[in-house]
Amino acid sequence: MAQDPDQERLDALEKRIAAAKEAAQGPRRSHQKEDYSQAQLAWRMVIELVAGLAIGFGIGYGLDTLLGTMPVFLVLFILAGLAAGIKTMLRSAQDVQERTAAAAAKKEED
């Protein structure tokens, strides 16, 4: 017994939809992913530096307000926050460099 013409059209439509979904979920261009990861890394480093400065400012200002020694602790803790932010940035950069080296070594093995 032959299939209903409507059923054949539905089957063909389902195949076309499945093919369109597969084409839409195809491989992404790698340079876009790489650009986004580099931008994400840059923003992460900027945020780490600004967070260190902000925390240092907050602690220094709070201590100066409590103790009445206005610029002393503010300057000291801003410098300490800057140093902590830079140290965190360098640690992030080293982590990324190690991951890149590991990926390159893995590619070389294959």
Image: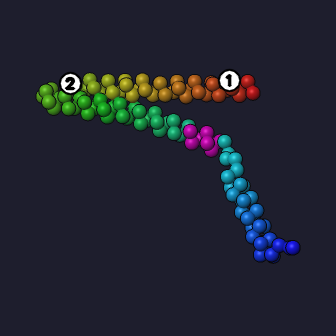
Q: Which mark is residue 105?
A: 1
Identify the residue under disc 2: 72
Assign the N terminus to one quadrant of the image: bottom right
Give whichever of 101, 3 is nearer the camera.
3
Side of 22 where 59 appears, left or right: left
Mark 2 or mark 1, whichever is nearer to me: 1
Q: Main secondary structure of the magenta part?
A: helix
The reply to whether the magenta stretch includes residue 87 is no
Residue type of the residue flagged with mark 2: Val
Q: Residue furthest front?
A: 1
Q: What are the residue bounds of the magenta stretch? A: 31-37
Give whichever of 100, 35 is nearer the camera.
100
Q: Nearer the N terminus, badge 2 or badge 1?
A: 2
Place of residue 86 in the rendered image (x, y in percent of width and height, measured from the top left): 41, 26
Side of 97 where 28 appears, left or right: right
Give whichever of 20, 48 is nearer the camera.
20
Q: Quadrant of residue 88?
A: top left
Q: Circle 2: is it few (<14), some (14-19), or many (20+) Cα within 10 Å?
A: few
Q: Circle 1 — which element?
A: helix
Q: Residue at x 75, y 27 (%)?
A: 110
Place of residue 89 in the rendered image (x, y in percent of width and height, measured from the top left): 45, 28
Q: Residue at x 19, y 28 (%)?
A: 63
Vertical side of 87 occupied by 43: above or below:
below
